[in-house]
Structure formats: structure tokens, C-alpha cells
Image: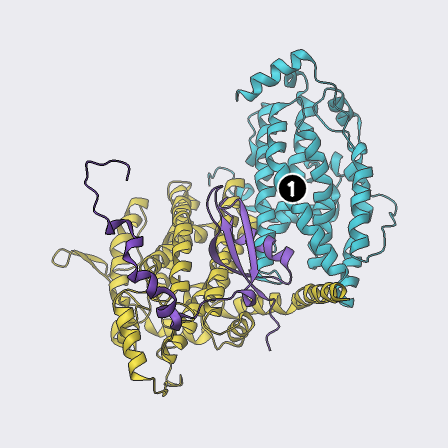
Chain colours: A cyan, B yellow, C purple
């Protein structure tokens, strides 16, 4: 399922050569500012909110080795978020950096999908969330490696290896929990069940992203759904779990209408910078 | 990291009455005195094995429990960079616990046994982790003072006599270097920040100073079994020596921050080339060792809950593997 | 009887051309997760290109008490060591 990016033209190749030299020249980015800013928030917020959720597990996982696995994933995601949000700040060019964006926006300004802000629940619910998100994110980043916006391409190229690991590790746990004990199987079913309503949103396109796709900057998410479904079914079969029955989709995250969970998450995450607005940490 | 011999002063601890073969014992002592390393399958006195199991597992428990006070601030770290660095640090600590649990297992104990000893209160962990982290400045203080004290204990242990322990310590020390720096950097930012930040930093120093001094264990006079530990290279420096060294190194660091060490008796002693300092509250120390520290219940509850509530996960993985092997055999 | 996950020994090759080196152990229920845990625990600072894991119970070790018969014969064959031979300094590359 290849995303629909335009064919690379000779003048694009010359531009790509300059980019490989290490300089960030993306004159096209200028005219795309508002849309690109929003897109970067979507990418960055997905990683930030999910990274934040994973930090809640620290010291509380079922085994020390699992604690380290979850922390590893969390660290990768926070790293991605830092790159995307800093870049968003640059593109916006209004004096906001990654920290300002992360710690001083309220819920209506966040652009993550609803899936990532869901609570951790038990380990099965956490794994369900990770498996679904990372499987989608892997395909997305594989496409973004070819983005016309070289800074996005660079972040994606670095992140895609990490995300492959996240997708594979979480799939392995889905399989072990699904095909483990009766208890783990039921918990895995319940865990996945929490999230089916949030899957569609990860693959939806709006006008903003469609325009960016036309410019070769973004990836057409609808093109990723087929591959995602194939992979999910493959893993669930191996886990001896029932295939998903997708209920009515719940959406809204991309336009700032989130679930009840995000407000609480932000209240915790943003407390210090908001309480001490003049402080540098 | 935390090698104070908690429990050494415990009168109910059984005294080893095994009569070791004198020839084997002498050969062992000669090897240890020659700075050789003892490896898992080598002959060793039972007392050596027991002491090491206790010391290494205590060290492991400390790293493991130590994830909790700092983990408490992960979701509230005030910048993306601070969040990432703290997460990496706590992850390191978990990793250190893991290296040490595995080193202890080479001496004939199991992870489950050690964890159960921790949960039942039989096994100790460093007293320092029984104190609460009340503000972000505490995260700075822990990195600066607690990791600072730990480094002083750990560096000499890289040449402890038991091979797996020494190698674990080498790994730990390599990774430890950034821990203290990140803590001190936080303190610098706060001490030079707003009035509220500076007040938080001073408050954190006030609360963490004395517990950090306690990390080096009771006074040498109260450590009766040290001689054997020294001879066996399980212990390399005396508690009082390390404590003095720590004070001498750390006071100038506090001065650089413009903070006041909460010890009215602190004074430079030209004659000895070091600081005189006040008396540690040993009542408090022993109370915390007994399990009466401010957050002892919270720490133990967190550890027990994670272990118990996660049992179904560990069992599921075992069940899956058993099924897989059965399928392969069929 | 312990209900722990089995223990695995971890060997890492940090760079092409080097051999795998023993770095420690991890617990894991099976070999795939053993590799994952080893990667998460022992390569956090990009320390490896290749990971081997072996169940600790599968390791066969020489008996340290047999160290004499196993290794001393090699010690007495001094001619295997380059320092046994006295080559004049003027001769290079040898």
C-alpha cells in the first residue's frame, strides 16, 4: 500500500541533493505554513500524549523487564514529539517552541487522535493501544520518509526503525496474552474492545491533509488502512482472538474535540509550567 | 548503589556456624588478597555467599524501589527535555536493578525469592528511598546528592571480589555519570531562577541532606562485621571515610548554587583539611531501617501491587510458551 | 519451586568484526522476548549490532576445579607465547 506521493521531478532531485548535504531548504514550506503547522501538531501530539501515558507505568509494570520495554517506547515517543513540536514552532514562526506548544495549549488546541489519550487500564489495554497505534504509525512513517518536506522526512527516517520495534514488540504481547491463559485472553479481548471505535480516526483524511498530500508533504492515510487491517487480522489470528467488529467510529481529536481523558492528562502534565509561567526549568 | 549493611546490626540475624574446610578457606583468602576475582562456580565460604546475596540483592532492591520517588515526577516534568532525561535515568535505574538481581542469582537465589523477601520486609533497601519527593526540586536534589553518594560507594566496588558483582558495577558506573549531572543541572536552573524556584531548591536541600549522609550507613564503631567484609573485598571503604569525603566534595557544590547546607555545625577544619559536621540523627536512621520511614508503606504497596497485579501477565507468557513447546513436540 | 521466567545469558557483538561478549542476563518466558528484553536492557546506549541469548541452563561450563588439567598444560608450553623468542629490535614487523 504505497501512499500517493507525486513522482519525483528532476528539479526535485536537485533539491533532494541539497537536502542530503545537510541544509534545510524547503522554500515550498513557506506557503504551507498554516496547514503544515497543524499537521505537525497532529504528528507531535500523537507521540507526546502516548509517550505521557507510558510514563505512568514506570515502576509499576508486571516485571522489571517489561518496565524497561515500556520506558523504551515512551522515550522514543517523547523524542519524536520533541522533534515534531519544535518543528511546528519553527513553521508557525510566532515565538513558540516545542515546550510552549506542549505545556501551554488547552484541550481544544491539541490535535492527537483519540486512541492515544485513552487510559492505560491494565497491561492488556496498554498493549492493545500500542499495537494498534504503532502498526498504523509504522506505515505512516514509512510513507513520510519520502515527504517533500525534508525535515519531516528526516524525523520519519530516524523514527521508522524505532516504530517497527514498537509494532513488533506489542504484537508479540498481543499474541502471548491472547494465546496465554483464559484470564489473559479475556483481558486482551476487553483491551482491544476498548479501542475499535477509535481506529477509523487514525486513517481519515480531511481537506487540510489532502492539500498536503497533493504537495507531496503528507501521506494519504486512507491508503494505509488495507495494510493495517491485514496485519491486525494476522496477529489476532495467531493470538487466537476474534477478528474486530468495528463499531460506529468516534472521532474529533484532529479538530480539538477530545475524550474526557485528555483534560486530566494535561492538568497533570502541564501543572508546573502553567503555575510558574516565568520559570525556566 | 546502596551498600550500607542494613541488617548487620540486627541481633536476630543468625550467626554462621558452618565449619569451612581450613585448606579451602585459606586458598580462598589468598586469592581474594591477591585481588583475584571469585566466579560463580568457584568454591567460596558459606558466609561469603550469604553476605553477598544479602548485599547484592539489597543493592538491587534499592535500584528497583528507587524508580518510585523519581517516577513520581515523570508525568509532571516541566519540559520535554527534562521528561526525556528523567525517563532515561529511571530506566537506567531499573536496568541496574536488573543487572544486580541477575548477579545475585548466580549465588543460588532466584528473582522470585528476592522479590518476596523485599515484599515481606525481610530484605532491606537503601533508607533514602523512604522519603517523599514533594517538588520538582527534589528530583534535582536526588540526582545531585543521592546519586552523588551512590557513585562514591559504587566506584570502589568495580574491584569487589565477586566477578558478576564487579562487572555489574562497571556497567552501572559507566551509566551513572549522567545521573548526577542531570540532578545538579536542575538545581542550577532552580537556584538561579525565580524566587519560588530558589525557595524550592533550598527546601529540597534541607530535606535531602541528612538522609543522604545516612546512605553511608552507621558509624564505623557500630559496624562490627566490617573487618571480614574488608578482607573479602566486599567492602572497600569505611562508612565514616566515605561520609567525610562526600561532605567535603558536596559542600562547595552547594556554595556554588548559593544554597545553605542545613547543618549549623558545619565548619571547615584547616588542620584535617576537611569539614567538621554535625551529628547524624541515628534514631531516625534506625527507625527508617526498621521500616518506619515516611513513605515506606507507599513504596512497599507500590511494589507489591505491581508484582501481584501483574502475575496474570507473567503466567500468560509462561502458558503461551508451554503451549508452543507442546505443539512443537507433537 | 520458582515461578520465575527462565534466566537467559546475553551476548552482544558491539561492532562488526568483533566477537560476541557476555554482558549479563535477563529473565524472559521465551526466546523471542529474551532477545527483546536483552535489547531493551543491554543496548540502551546503542551498544550492539548483534544479540545472542542462551538459556542459562543450556550453558555448559568447564569445572573451575579442573582448571589445572584444562589450562596449566598450555601455561607450560611457553613456546606458544611471542615473548619466548628473542628477536633483535632491528628486525621490524615481527
Going by the image, does A64 lie left or right of C21? Answer: right
Say which residue appears at 27% left-offset and 78% top-offset: B26
Q: Quadrant of residue B211?
A: bottom left
Q: Position of residue B323 (x, y in %)?
A: 74, 66
Say which residue appears at 80% left-offset and 49% top-offset: A234
Vertical position of residue B111 compared to residue A200: above or below: below
Going by the image, does A213 lie left or right of B188? Answer: right
Vertical position of residue C58 compared to residue C78: above or below: below
Going by the image, does C62 lie left or right of C39? Answer: left
Label 1 sits on residue: A163
Q: Is residue A105 visible?
A: no
Q: Position of residue B166 (x, y in %)?
A: 37, 61
Front residue (pair B251, A210): A210
Going by the image, does A196 lie left or right of B153? Answer: right
Q: Residue furthest left?
A: B271
Image quarter in which the N terminus of chain A is found? top right
Query: Regarding mark 1 in the picture, which secondary structure is present there?
Result: helix
Say which residue appears at 60% left-offset and 49% top-offset: A268
Say which residue appears at 60% left-offset and 78% top-offset: C1
Vertical position of residue A3 compared to residue A61: above or below: above
Q: Position of residue A55 (x, y in %)?
A: 59, 51
Q: Quadrant of residue A49?
A: top right
Q: Position of residue B12 (x, y in %)?
A: 40, 85
Amino acid at each position: 500500500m504505497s501512499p500517493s506521493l507525486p513522482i519525483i521531478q528532476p528539479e526535485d532531485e536537485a533539491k533532494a541533493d541539497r537536502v542530503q548535504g545537510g541544509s534545510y531548504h524547503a522554500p515550498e514550506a513557506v506557503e504551507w505554513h498554516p496547514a503544515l503547522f497543524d499537521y505537525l501538531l497532529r504528528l507531535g501530539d500523537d507521540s507526546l500524549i502516548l509517550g505521557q501515558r507510558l510514563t505512568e507505568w514506570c515502576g509499576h509494570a508486571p516485571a522489571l523487564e517489561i518496565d524497561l520495554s515500556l520506558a523504551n517506547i515512551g522515550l522514543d515517543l517523547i523524542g519524536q514529539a520533541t522533534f515534531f513540536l519544535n518543528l511546528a514552532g519553527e513553521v508557525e514562526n510566532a515565538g513558540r517552541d516545542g515546550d510552549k506548544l506542549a505545556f501551554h495549549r488547552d484541550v481544544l488546541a491539541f490535535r492527537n487522535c483519540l486512541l492515544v489519550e485513552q487510559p492505560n487500564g491494565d497491561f492488556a489495554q496498554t498493549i492493545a493501544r500500542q499495537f494498534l497505534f504503532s502498526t498504523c504509525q509504522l506505515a505512516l512513517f514509512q510513507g513520510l520518509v519520502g515527504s517533500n518536506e525534508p525535515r519531516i522526512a528526516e524525523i520519519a527516517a530516524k523514527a521508522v526503525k524505532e516504530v517497527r520495534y514498537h509494532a513488533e514488540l506489542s504484537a508479540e504481547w498481543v499474541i502471548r496474552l491472547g494465546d496465554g491463559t483464559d484470564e489473559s485472553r479475556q483481558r486482551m479481548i476487553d483491551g482491544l474492545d476498548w479501542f475499535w471505535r477509535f481506529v477509523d480516526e487514525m486513517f481519515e483524511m480531511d481537506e487540510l491533509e489532502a492539500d498536503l498530500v497533493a504537495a507531496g508533504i503528507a501521506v494519504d492515510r486512507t491508503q494505509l488502512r488495507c495494510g493495517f487491517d491485514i496485519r491486525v487480522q494476522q496477529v489476532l489470528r495467531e493470538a487466537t482472538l476474534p477478528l474486530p467488529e468495528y463499531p460506529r467510529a468516534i472521532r474529533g481529536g484532529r479538530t480539538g474535540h477530545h475524550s474526557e481523558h485528555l483534560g486530566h492528562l494535561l492538568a497533570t502534565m502541564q501543572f508546573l509550567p502553567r503555575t510558574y509561567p516565568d520559570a525556566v526549568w | 548503589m546502596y551498600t550500607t549493611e542494613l541488617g548487620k546490626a540486627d541481633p536476630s540475624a543468625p550467626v554462621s556456624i558452618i565449619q569451612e574446610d581450613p585448606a579451602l578457606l585459606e586458598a580462598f583468602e589468598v586469592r581474594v588478597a591477591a585481588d583475584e576475582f571469585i566466579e560463580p562456580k568457584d568454591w567460596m565460604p558459606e558466609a561469603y555467599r550469604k553476605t553477598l546475596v544479602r548485599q547484592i540483592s539489597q543493592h538491587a532492591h534499592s535500584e528497583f524501589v528507587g524508580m518510585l520517588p523519581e517516577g513520581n515526577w515523570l508525568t509532571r516534568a516541566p519540559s520535554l527535555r527534562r521528561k526525556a532525561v528523567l525517563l532515561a535515568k529511571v530506566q537506567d535505574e531499573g536496568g541496574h536493578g536488573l543487572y544486580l538481581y541477575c548477579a545475585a542469582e548466580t549465588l543460588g537465589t532466584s528473582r522470585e525469592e528476592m522479590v518476596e523477601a523485599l515484599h515481606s520486609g525481610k530484605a532491606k533497601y537503601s533508607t533514602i528511598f523512604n522519603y517523599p519527593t514533594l517538588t520538582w526540586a527534589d528530583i534535582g536534589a536526588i540526582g545531585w546528592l543521592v546519586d552523588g553518594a551512590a557513585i562514591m560507594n559504587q566506584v570502589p566496588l568495580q574491584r569487589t571480589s565477586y566477578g558478576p558483582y564487579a562487572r555489574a558495577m562497571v556497567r552501572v558506573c559507566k551509566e551513572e555519570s549522567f545521573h548526577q549531572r542531570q540532578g545538579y543541572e536542575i538545581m542550577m536552573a532552580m537556584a538561579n531562577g525565580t524566587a519560588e524556584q530558589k525557595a524550592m531548591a533550598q527546601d529540597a536541600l534541607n530535606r535531602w541532606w541528612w538522609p543522604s549522609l545516612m546512605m553511608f550507613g552507621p558509624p564505623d564503631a557500630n559496624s562490627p562485621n566490617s573487618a571480614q567484609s574488608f578482607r573479602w573485598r566486599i567492602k572497600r571503604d569505611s562508612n565514616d571515610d566515605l561520609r567525610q569525603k562526600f561532605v567535603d566534595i558536596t559542600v562547595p557544590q552547594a556554595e556554588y548554587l548559593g544554597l545553605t547546607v542545613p547543618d549549623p555545625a558545619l565548619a571547615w577544619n584547616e588542620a584535617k583539611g576537611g569539614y567538621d559536621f554535625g551529628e547524624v540523627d541515628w534514631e531516625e536512621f534506625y527507625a527508617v531501617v526498621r521500616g518506619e520511614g515516611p513513605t515506606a508503606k507507599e513504596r512497599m504497596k507500590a511494589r507489591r501491587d505491581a508484582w501481584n497485579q501483574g502475575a496474570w501477565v507473567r503466567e500468560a507468557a509462561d502458558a503461551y510458551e508451554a503451549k508452543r513447546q507442546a505443539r512443537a513436540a507433537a | 519451586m520458582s515461578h520465575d521466567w527462565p534466566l537467559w545469558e546475553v551476548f552482544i557483538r558491539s561492532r562488526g568484526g568483533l566477537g560476541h561478549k557476555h554482558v549479563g542476563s535477563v529473565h524472559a518466558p521465551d526466546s523471542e522476548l529474551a532477545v527483546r528484553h536483552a535489547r531493551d536492557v543491554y543496548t540502551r546506549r546503542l551498544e550492539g549490532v548483534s544479540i545472542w541469548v542462551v538459556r542459562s541452563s543450556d550453558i555448559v561450563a568447564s569445572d573451575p576445579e579442573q582448571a589445572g588439567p584444562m589450562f596449566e598444560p598450555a601455561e607450560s608450553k611457553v613456546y606458544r607465547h611471542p615473548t619466548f623468542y628473542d628477536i633483535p629490535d632491528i628486525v621490524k614487523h615481527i
